[in-house]
Amino acid sequence: MPCICSIILVLNSFDIRLGKEKISLKKGSVVAIEYNLKVFFSSNKDNIMIVDIEEKTVNDFFKNNTLSPFSVRRFYSAYLIVNCTDYSLLKNLIGCLNCDGETTAVVKNSILFACLAILSSEKMFQSFLFGCLNSLGSKVKAIIHSDISAAWRLCDISSRLCLSESLLKRKLKHEGLSFSKLILEERMVMAERLLSYNFYPVGKVAKICGYESASYFISVFRRYFGVPPHEYSSRFFLEKGKM
């Protein structure tokens, strides 16, 4: 997947011009930028540490921060200066990502999530990430995961995105998606995760995933995965025990 943004840690103070705007960056500050702005920092490579973030990483970050609300806006800034209280930790994490040694995908993703988590204390950071998402489907998923237990309707999503329902439908169709398919997939992914890694009863999983009726949730889950939730969970822990 393509990179959509970059996180820049300022090692030494310098001034930079982004378009018509001149910005003074102080040592220790952090700047989140849209990926296409990265070229403006090329003359200051000795003064910064930088890590690029793919769209999939941002998608997964929103999935792992289900209960974190964020503001959906009509327009988004192309950059965000973030107040980082964990400068040393972030510096070490970015250093690990930029080292020459091989890093497995799992470890790399964990480090990237840690970098994003450090910056998420800035209240506008998740909104910035949302604005960087390229596909409409990714934005719909992010909104769903802001409260996956909510009874989301097409009109709720369209109003958040400042689009008419018909335009939202057309744009999703252009990406080969539909709202009903998206919300089903995201709820089932969440259900699978809860059943696989948590000892939640089926009724609680159903409620977390936005289903008032546990029996209806079981029916939907069976159609999607081919087995009922309790059997899926039992198989997972049985296979895990054999490892």
Image: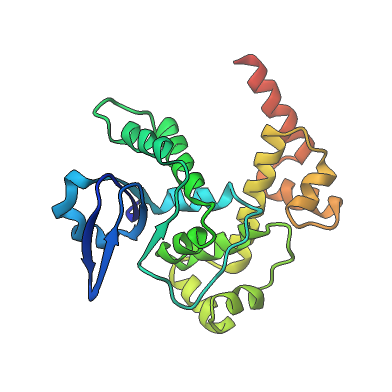
Q: Residue at x 53, y 77 (%)?
A: 168
Q: Residue at x 21, y 62 (%)?
A: 16
List the single residue furthest toward the left. Answer: 43
Q: How is the image coloured?
A: rainbow
Residue 227 in which image quadrant: top right
Q: Is residue 79 above or below residue 74?
A: above
Q: Is residue 1 above or below residue 98?
A: below
- Looking at the image, which is closer to me, 164 or 49? 49
Q: Residue at x 44, y 76 (%)?
A: 75
Q: Quadrant of the C terminus?
A: top right
Residue 204 in which image quadrant: top right
List the single residue furthest toward the top. Answer: 242
Residue 194 drawn at (x, y percent): 70, 40
Residue 179 drawn at (x, y percent): 59, 68
Residue 46 drawn at (x, y percent): 17, 44
Q: Is residue 11 above or below residue 71?
A: above
Q: Is residue 97 above or below residue 16?
A: above
- Looking at the image, which is closer to me, 110 or 233? 110
Is 205 on the left or on the right of 187, as rendered?
right
Is 206 on the left or on the right of 105, as rendered?
right
Q: Residue at x 41, y 41 (%)?
A: 87
